[in-house]
Amino acid sequence: CMDERFVDSPHDFIPERWLPDAVEARKGTEKEMVDHPFFRDPFSQGARKCPGSRVAANEIQIMIAQLVLDWNMESAVKQMEDIEYSQRSTIELYIPDITLQSRM
């Protein structure tokens, strides 16, 4: 939702907006709508939830864990603020150069 009536600074990357204190502060207001499970979860909710959602989430975690175990990764970027991105309906990151060196 990119509507400023529901999200403060919708074009800015502010992950803190999803912390429990921020969610609690939105309760009872028009902005509470963005905390609804149908907006939070890409796999939907309830009886019509994607049956493969748990498999997909577990596969992502396993893949990332295996990358960390198998590769030594280095980048010139040392702070999150140095990573460029743009936001439209999704966030598009401009991935910096990463040097990979096998641990094997």
Image (cartoon, rainbow, N blue to C red):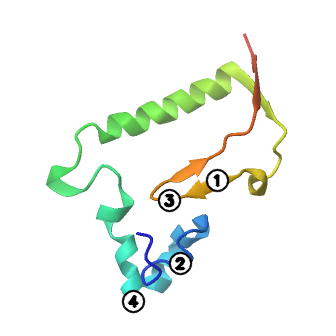
**Contact (CB < 8 A) between labels 1 and 3?**
no
Instruction: Give me the disc on residue 85.
Output: 1
Find numbered disc 4 in the image and state the secondary structure of the residue it sits on: loop
Specify whether 85 is left or right of 77: left
Residue at image location 35% in from the left, 56% down from the top? 41
Examine the rendered structure and indicate whether residue 51 appears above or below residue 2.
Answer: above
* Residue wearing tag 2: 22
Q: CA distance from mark 1 to mark 3?
A: 10 Å
Q: Camera-side residue: 38 or 92? A: 92
Label 1 sits on what residue type?
Tyr
Q: Is residue 41 left or right of residue 83?
A: left
User: Percent position (x, y) of residue 91?
Assistant: 54, 54
Q: How dense is the environment of label 4, judged by Cα within 10 Å: few (below 14), some, or many (20 and up)? A: few
Q: Which mark is residue 88?
A: 3
Q: CA distance from mark 2 to mark 4?
A: 12 Å
Q: Earlier in the sequence, mark 2 or mark 4?
A: 2
Q: Nearer the viewer, mark 1 or mark 2?
A: 1
Q: Mark 1 against mark 4, which lies toward the viewer?
A: 1
Q: Nearer the viewer, mark 3 or mark 4?
A: 3
